[in-house]
Image (cartoon, grey):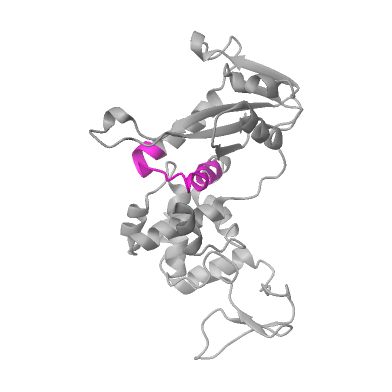
Amino acid sequence: MCDLTNPIYSDADKAREHLEALHWPNGPVCPKCGETENVTRLQGKSTRAGVVMCNACRKPFTVTVGTIFERSKIGLNKWLLGFRLMAGSKKGISAHQLHRSLGITYKSAWFMSHRIREAMDIEPEGPLGGENTVVEADETYVGGKQKNRATRRVKPKKPVMVLVQREGHARSFHVANVNAKELRGLIATNVDRASHLMTDEAHVYTKVGREFAGHSVVNHSAKEYVTTGGFKHSNTAENFFSIFKRGVIGTYHHMSEAHLGRYCREFDFRYNTRNISDTERAEEALKGARGKRLTYKQPSSLAA
């Protein structure tokens, strides 16, 4: 049976119960004082479903308090369906598609998608790589071409860098400039020094490469892509970018520089959870929704 027929995507009460099971596996937790035992579920016709009273601090709350769902007028079942659609769309899903699929306004769908990307931004557990591990580093540029425009000038392309551990996780970043100083900071912060760093022949990697256990260079300008034995290559990073670029070209078409970092987190999340099912991936994203409340004012001011 297709999991999209699950009642949590059509019934708001079922959706709330599912969210409670994910966020409160051992019972309700007060978001204000952290109380877990001295809490009471409120009953009665005049009480909204899911309201819990904390007897310690005397504050009522629901499972949505302190999450990206707090004070949202959109039904929880539509929120959960939005999570499922974004988690299961390998190349992303546009806000217009969410607007049509969920039956909400485009403005709500756009804001919902950015909230979901925030939930997908899960704190990494330590640096990438380690002893006897290869981490590939590469960069690309996001944006249009002037030859595809008749008159108006195209804005400069925006650089994106990725670090990918072979058979492991990826972390991508929007960077202001592709230079040795900026890239060195990201690599040194996110990659274990015991790793073997794999890059192309760009000079920005020469100095930072000396800080690692090993540094190999793939000379793309000389049409070198992989050596005999298959060790020296940056195809893992190129694979990440191939999916990322398909999302840019085929789904989103344009990524605002103000929000490019969030799009990077979205593609990182799907790549890093590629070995689990779409349903499990959606649940992981839902777990990341707590503590990340986002208001309209925040993204609007960034975009301005």
Region in magenta: 248-269
From the viewer's side, name the closer residue of 15 and 265. Answer: 265
Q: Where 32 sits versus 94, above or below?
A: below
| Residue 213 appears left or right of 265 | right
Question: Residue 66 falls in which quadrant of the image?
Answer: bottom right
Q: Is residue 60 above or below residue 154?
A: below
Predominant SS along the magenta part: helix
User: Does residue 167 show up?
Assistant: no
Which residue is depicted at the point 54% across and 50% down?
281
Residue at far left of view: 150
Q: Quadrant of residue 193?
A: top right
Looking at the rendered image, the quarter that the C terminus falls into is: bottom left
Q: Is residue 175 left or right of residue 89?
A: right
x and y percent of residue 273 in the render? 57, 43
* Residue found 23% across the figure and 33% down from its top: 150
Picture coordinates of residue 30 (x, y %)?
A: 68, 75
**273 or 215, which is in the foreground?**
215
Q: Is residue 93 left or right of residue 25?
A: left
Residue 214 on image: x %, y %: 72, 19
